[in-house]
Image (spheres, helix red, strand yellow):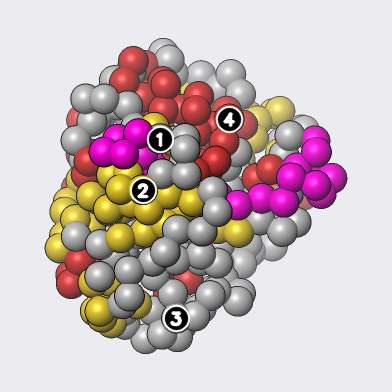
Amino acid sequence: MRAVVLDRAGTPLRLSELPSPEPGPGQALLRVRACGVCRTDLHVLDGELADPKLPLVLGHQIVGEVLVSAGRFEPGSRVGVPWLGWTCGECRYCRAGQENLCDRARFTGYHLDGGYAELAVADERYCFPIPEGYPDEQAAPLLCAGLIGYRSLRFAGEAERLGLYGFGASAHIVCQVAVAQGRQVYAGTRADDNEAQAFARSLGAVWAGDALAGPPEELDAVIVFAPAGELVPAALGRLRKGGVVVCAGIHMSDIPAFPYELLWGERVVRSVANLTRADGEEFLALAPTVPIRTEVETFPLDDANRALERLRHGELRGAAVLVP
Ligand SMILES: [Zn+2]
Ligand SMILES: [Zn+2]
């Protein structure tokens, strides 16, 4: 099969011919129909996440057609493979229903080969049926940008005035859910990113502008999607008492020191890590009812490096998706 491979951090992906993967016990063999590109892929590529499998096939938003199933799926059906690829089922977190925090979790496109390839294997217990009515490439970003964005939104609680800082793949999905729930969305972007601001307004944001300065109104919660630590004190500075700043990314530059006054008043800063299977089932059932429409830019497999660089430089509208 053809795949794009990461040999070591800091080097571009290399298009190569690999032996077809063999499904192990409990695994399905999938033909990859689309695979979303996530900022986490950039963090792995840049060496910001420790100890990836190497060489590695990136990609953890896989929409695949089942070629061989271990029993859970009909051959020919469509399934999604998310970031959470395997958990131990035994540690204190797994036993407490927090499998997203499993001490021994293995993640797709990080510890396990992912979907920047023509074929992939995945543990069927962690796959999701893809809702009908979504074309492959539009379903792919639901699997991480959507799913982890949705988990982040849950941690924003009942917030009516909701800030979304960093308006990329995840925010453009969360914005649609939040607007459908009757919330007001305030989209923070780079000061001069008029295109992202217009995109946010087109999806129902009541305000879009410079995230560092923030909107004139006080916010009930802010979800920070951009990996920029300086956005945390900036968001706290716009937050009402008792509000929460949710950091949705897996990696962020250092958060600068800030006066305690910004946190005082029972304001909270928290992160969101990974996903549980329950998150995925809940979100994929919700998506068609909103209905969430994902905006995607597609790339062939051998253009994976270009897709990642466009993501790095904030040049995408919505999500990048590889179509092998
Ligand atoms: Zn992701
Ligand atoms: Zn565990």
Q: Is mark 4 within 8 Å of ligand 2?
A: no
| Mark 2 or mark 1: whose residue is earlier in sequence | 2
Q: Residue at x 47, y 44 (%)?
A: 70
Q: Which residue does the numbered mark 1 point to in the structure image? A: 73
The answer to whether marks 2 and 4 mark residues whose Cβ atoms lie closer than 8 Å is no
Of the residues tagged 4 and 1, which is closer to the observer?
1
Tag 3: amino acid: Pro
The numbered mark, 3 or 4, whose residue comes first in the sequence reads 3
Is 53 within the magenta? no
Side (left or right) of 58 relative to 192: right
Q: Is residue 53 above or below residue 245?
A: below
Q: Is mark 3 within 8 Å of ligand 1?
A: no
Point out the frontmost of discs 2 and 4. 2
* Residue bearing the label numbered 2: 68
Q: Earlier in the sequence, mark 4 or mark 1?
A: 1
Tag 3 near tag 4, CB within 8 Å: no
Tag of residue 249: none
Which is more N-terminal, label 1 or label 3?
3
Q: Amino acid at mark 4?
A: Ala
Span of residues in magenta: 74-96
Task: Tell me the element at label 3.
Answer: loop
User: Is 176 on the left-hand or right-hand side of 108?
Assistant: left
Quadrant in the rendering for residue 138? top left
Given this view, does label 3 or label 1 mark the residue nearer the observer? 1
Task: List the residue tagged with mark 3.
Answer: 55
Q: Could you tell me which residue is drawn at 58 percent across and 30 percent down?
A: 278
Q: Earlier in the sequence, mark 2 or mark 3?
A: 3
Identity of the amino acid at label 1?
Answer: Phe
Say which residue appears at 26% left-offset and 80% top-offset. Answer: 16
Q: Amino acid at mark 2?
A: Val
